[in-house]
Image (cartoon, rainbow, N blue to C red):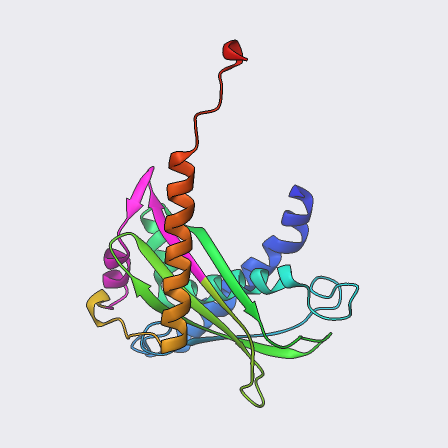
């Protein structure tokens, strides 16, 4: 698993970061990618890494491309530079995805990524997979993440301020994304409550 991460995944992450930095170099700095308008990540379903035995993109590959889209977005907006400077890291706490249409081998697709909710701890991003020629939806994923720094939590407000954005001006999500977000938040709260109510595991001496 570690070797696969180094050989396969790390180069894809590096390429996504390079693409994001190239976008940042060409930009005027006020695009508001991922905030006022979606950031668009473009890719093609790879035969060797993305396609499964059913002849379409594997469900796990969607999440890999969501991660690559986030790397590209953070590099394009300067968020990655800020996180590295502050020695902070984006930690994904929850991901929910709805598959709508299959993505076939070598098929091109886009991921439109936008921040749909945030507070002083959490950031929630929507990843919308779309066909580039028609705009047809292929899948939708929600990612809830936290920015960890020195063992603590770094406020998204400081992160956004560092790249010239104001958390209070975060656009409201569409109705269907808002409903999905509320469902994810309810599930997250239920899981936390369930974990707290579970009895402590017996110590070896008590068994």
Residue that appears at 26% across and 58% down? 119
In the image, is 146 to the left or to the right of 206? left
Residue reaching furthest bottom?
134
Which part of the image, by quadrant, shows the C terminus? top right
Mark count: 0
Which residue corresponds to the image point at 29% horizontal and 61% vertical from the top-left? Answer: 118
Place of residue 8 in the rendered image (x, y in percent of width and height, measured from the top left): 67, 54
In this rendering, is residue 188 above or below 63? above
Q: Is residue 70 above or below residue 139?
A: above
- Image quadrant assignment for residue 99: bottom right
Which quadrant, please, contains the N terminus?
Answer: top right
Q: Position of residue 152 (x, y in %)?
A: 30, 40
Task: Give the answer, above or below, for where 20 lies relative to 10.
Answer: below
Residue 60 seen: yes
| Residue sitting nearer the eye, 88 or 120 | 120
Residue 165 drawn at (x, y percent): 25, 68
Q: Is residue 1 on the magenta stretch?
A: no
Side of 69 where 162 appears, left or right: left
Residue 15 left/right relative to 114: right
Using the image, determine if residue 138 lies above or below residue 147: below
- Indicate the position of residue 117 as horizontal and vertical percent values: 32, 65
Q: In this rendering, does residue 84 appear at all?
A: no
Q: Residue at x 37, y 74 (%)?
A: 33
Q: Nearer the viewer, residue 87 or 22?
A: 87
Residue for point 67% across, 75% down: 103
Q: Which residues are magenta?
A: 143-165
- Of all residues, the one furthest to the top in this rendering is 205
Judge whether residue 148 is colored magenta: yes
């Amino acid at each position: 698993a570690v070797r696969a991460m180094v050989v396969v995944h790390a180069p894809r992450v590096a390429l996504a970061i390079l693409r994001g930095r190239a976008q940042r170099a060409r930009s005027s700095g006020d695009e508001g990618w991922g905030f006022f308008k979606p950031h668009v990540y473009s890719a093609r379903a790879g035969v060797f890494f993305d396609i499964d035995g059913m002849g379409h993109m594997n469900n796990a590959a969607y999440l890999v491309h969501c991660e690559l889209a986030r790397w590209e977005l953070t590099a394009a907006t300067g968020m990655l530079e800020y996180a590295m400077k502050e020695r902070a890291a984006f930690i994904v706490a929850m991901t929910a995805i709805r598959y709508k249409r299959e993505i076939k081998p070598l098929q091109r697709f886009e991921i439109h990524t936008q921040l749909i909710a945030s507070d002083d701890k959490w950031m929630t991003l929507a990843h919308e997979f779309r066909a580039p020629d028609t705009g047809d939806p292929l899948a939708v994923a929600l990612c809830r993440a936290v920015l960890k720094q020195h063992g603590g939590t770094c406020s998204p407000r400081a992160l956004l301020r560092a790249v010239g954005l104001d958390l209070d001006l975060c656009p409201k999500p569409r109705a269907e994304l808002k409903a999905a977000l509320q469902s994810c938040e309810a599930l997250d709260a239920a899981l936390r409550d369930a974990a707290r109510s579970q009895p402590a595991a017996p110590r070896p001496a008590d068994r």
